[in-house]
Amino acid sequence: LQPDDDENCQVDLETKLLKENLNEGESTQINVSIKNTNKKTGQPMTIAIVGIPGGMEVRTEQLDEFVKQKRIDFYEVRGRDLCIYLVAMDKSQVVDVPVDVVAKIPGTYYGPASRVYLYYTDEEKKWNKPLKVNIEPIEN
């Protein structure tokens, strides 16, 4: 479920789902924190891929605002992966991205393991355990 980290990876990632038990249609956030662990130098293009649990949908309006504010440089949603791109990171920089998600389909789901890496050294990754969510159906 979670591959081993590469010790040479110069960036780190933390992901946390604020609420793991939701009702269908309810919203919550995934707190994403991307960190340059190198205290001496900046980093080039960094990619954080957040594994979204099944049954959940990413609210992209908020991410569009983060791009306009230059908080992140680009993002894309590919299936159950939310990819966040940072063109460069300063030494020891931390970028926090709260991602709004909505519970859409009842059930218990795990997302793919989240990971972060530098664009040109994608073999050197840091991994996070898969996020888990339980979505209860709305009673009629």
Image: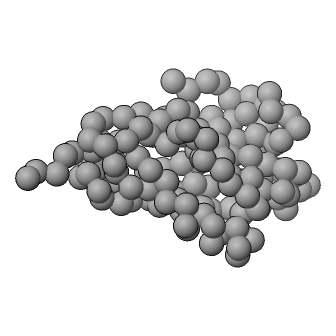
**Quadrant in the rendering for residue 114:** top right
Question: Is 82 drawn above or below residue 100 in the view shown?
Answer: above
Question: Is 93 drawn above or below residue 22 in the view shown?
Answer: below
Query: Number of numbered discs present?
Result: 0
Question: Is 62 drawn above or below residue 28 in the view shown?
Answer: below
**Quadrant in the rendering for residue 4:** top right
* Extreme residue toward the front, this view: 140
Residue at figure coordinates x 72%, y 63% from the top left? 72
Estimate the x, y position of residue 30 in percent, counting from the top left.
48, 54
Estimate the x, y position of residue 123 in percent, counting from the top left.
80, 27
Estimate the x, y position of residue 32 in percent, counting from the top left.
57, 54
In the image, taking residue 5 as reference, residue 113 lies left or right, namely: left
**Whether residue 38 is visible:** yes
Residue at figure coordinates x 73%, y 58% from the top left? 74
**Whether residue 129 is visible:** no
Estimate the x, y position of residue 115 in percent, counting from the top left.
65, 38
- The scheme the figure's colours follow is one colour
Question: Is 123 drawn above or below residue 68 in the view shown?
Answer: above
The one nearer the camera, 75 or 110, is 75
* Extreme residue toward the left, this view: 140
In the image, taking residue 105 as reference, residue 122 lies left or right, namely: right
In the image, taking residue 112 as reference, residue 78 lies left or right, namely: right
In the image, taking residue 103 as reference, residue 124 lies left or right, namely: right
* Extreme residue toward the right, this view: 41
The one nearer the camera, 9 or 25, is 25
**Quadrant in the rendering for residue 79:** top right
Residue at figure coordinates x 82%, y 42% from the top left? 118
